[in-house]
Amino acid sequence: MSRVLVKCGGAAASLGVQELTGQLTAAGHEVCVVHGAGPQISEEMRRRGLEVQFVEGRRVTSDASLDIVREALMAVNESLCTSLGDRAVGLMGDAIGLKARRLPELGLVGNALPSRPAAVLDALAAGSIPVVAPLAEGPLNVNADEAAVALAAGLAADRILFLTDVPGVLVNGKIVDTLVADDVDQMLANGVFEGGIVPKLRAAVNAARLGIAAGIGETAVVVDGPVIAADTASDEADQP
C-alpha cells in the first residue's frame, strides 16, 4: 500500500477527482486530496471591487481578500467532499496545523512548510479521504500546489498527482510523457511556460527532488530522464 496525494484546482475540483480517488482507494492506496479555489476567489474579489494580483504564482492577500479566500475554499471543500461521498473528511488547513513561513511583502501569504497534521493521519488510518483546503496557521493564504507538496513531504507520501483541465503538460504543442527537473528549470527561466502551469511545474519539480513521484496529468516530472527541447509551451490552470 502506498500513500498518494492528489491536488486539484478550483476550476477542476470535481473533474476526474472522484474517478481517480476511487481507482486509487480500490487498489488499496491511502489518498489525501488538496484543492484550490482560484477562479472562485478571483471572481468574488472582482465582484467586491478588490484588485486581483499575483506575484510568482502567489496571490497578494489583504485582510479583506483573506475572508474571500476562506469562504471560497470552504465552498469548494464542501462541494468536493459531497462528490467524493461518505469517506471524504473536509479539513481547513489552518485548523489542523498546516505550517507556513509568512511572506509579509505579499500580505497575509505564506510559503508552505512540510506538515504532518494529526487530523490527516487519523483520517487516513480510518480509511477515509482527507480533503484539505490550503490555508496555513496565522491564518495565511498559501499556494495550493506548494501546500500539496509540503503536505506530501510531511506525510511521507509516495506519489503526488496534479489534476488539471488538460491531459498533461504541452511542449511544442504536444502532451509529453516525461519532463526532467533540470530541463523544467531551464524552460521556466526562459519563459517557455506561462500561466497556471508555472506553479504546478515548480511544485512537481520540488516533489521529484524530495523523492516523491510526481505527475501533472499524463506527464511525469522526474529527476533524471530524456532531454526535451522546447520552443513553446502553454497550459491554462487556476491559481489559489
Image: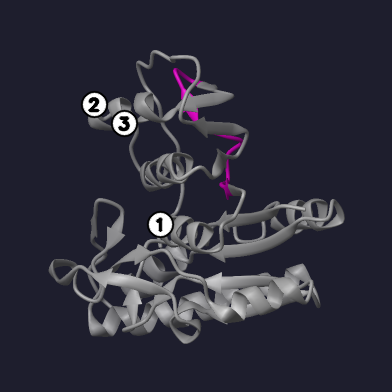
> Circles 1 and 3: CB distance less than 8 Å?
no
Along the viewing direction, whichever of 3 and 161 lies nearer the viewer: 3
Q: Which of marks 2 and 1 is in front?
A: 1
Identify the mark at residue 190; answer none if there is no mark: 2
Along the viewing direction, whichever of 167 and 212 lies nearer the viewer: 212
* Sequence-first tag of 3 and 2: 3
> Magenta segment: does it hold 165?
yes
x and y, in percent, of residue 187 in the image? 31, 26
Q: Give the residue at mark 3.
A: 185
Determine whether the residue tagged by mark 1 lies in a helix, strand or loop. Answer: helix
User: In screen coordinates, is 78 left or right of 182?
Assistant: right
Determine whether the residue tagged by mark 2 lies in a helix, strand or loop. Answer: loop
Could you tell me the amino acid type at mark 2? Asn
Q: Which residue is drawn at 48% across and 86% down?
A: 95
Could you tell me the amino acid type at mark 3? Asp
Above or below, 116 against 6 in this view is below
Q: Give the residue at mark 1.
A: 146
